Amino acid sequence: MARFLIERRSPLPADEAWRRITDWPRHSAHVPLTRITATPPGPTRPGTVVLARTGVGRAVFDDPMEVVRWEPPEPTGRPGHCRLEKRGSVVVGWAEIHVRRDGAGSRVVWEEDARVRALPRLCDRPTAWVGRLVFGRMIGRMLGPGRPTRTTGPLPPAD
């Protein structure tokens, strides 16, 4: 699997960083050649399916992800945690988003372990590199000004 981690500090409060980073349709503006929707309509919750449709013309594939954990950050300081399970025929794996208060701002961590079924494991390192690049830019743009704190990968497989 192509596992990578992106961590960003933001001047935004944790609840606003969470709102921005989990605004699924807004991801479309920052991920090339991709349109993202969520069903059912309304607030995200366990069972929500986030569908990323990527491609051009007839060369399109769907990457459906089911929200299996949804815990927004709380004013008490409890961090937010979202886990998405990739359920597609092309991309499999998972992604986790953590948002916590960090001083007057917040810290966002996006960790993903994904694999494109048609690619041999030899492609995991380049896939992780592309994932870090695309998602790192997306997260930076969605959060606005801030500074990267850590981007790593590929990471060893999760237990």
Image (tube, helix red, strand yellow):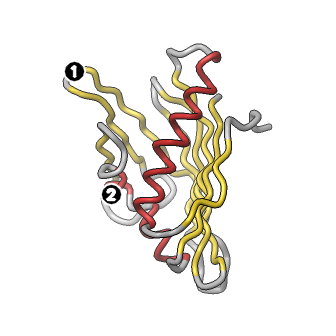
Which of these two is toward me, 159 or 68? 159
- Quadrant of residue 92 in the image? top right
Which of these two is toward me, 44 or 157? 157
Instruction: Point out the residue furthest to the left here.
Output: 57
Quadrant including the C terminus: top right
Q: Residues within 10 Å of mark 2 (few under 14, many from 20)?
A: some
Left or right of residue 51: residue 77: right
Q: Identify which residue is drawn at 37% across, 40% down.
A: 52
Picture mark count: 2
Instruction: Point out the residue furthest to the right here.
Output: 159
| Residue 158 percent across, percent down from the top left | 75, 38
Task: Give the residue pinned by disc 2.
Answer: 26
Q: Identify which residue is drawn at 56% across, 65% down.
A: 147
Q: Earlier in the sequence, mark 2 or mark 1?
A: 2
Q: Residues within 10 Å of mark 1 (few under 14, many from 20)?
A: few
Left or right of residue 94: residue 12: left
| Residue 14 percent across, percent down from the top left | 55, 76
Left or right of residue 11: residue 125: right
Seen in the picture, residue 64 relative to 37 is either above or below; the reply is above
Quadrant including the N terminus: top right
Say what amino acid the circle numbered 1 marks: Arg
Task: Give the residue pinned by disc 1.
Answer: 58
Q: Identify which residue is drawn at 58% across, 57% down.
A: 97
| Residue 89 percent across, percent down from the top left | 45, 24
Alpha-carbon span between mark 2 and mark 1? 24 Å
Say what amino acid the circle numbered 2 marks: Arg
Q: Identify which residue is drawn at 59% across, 13% down.
A: 120
Query: For the residue labelled by badge 1, is the local secondary structure a helix, a strand or a loop?
Result: loop
Seen in the picture, residue 12 relative to 98 is either above or below; the reply is below
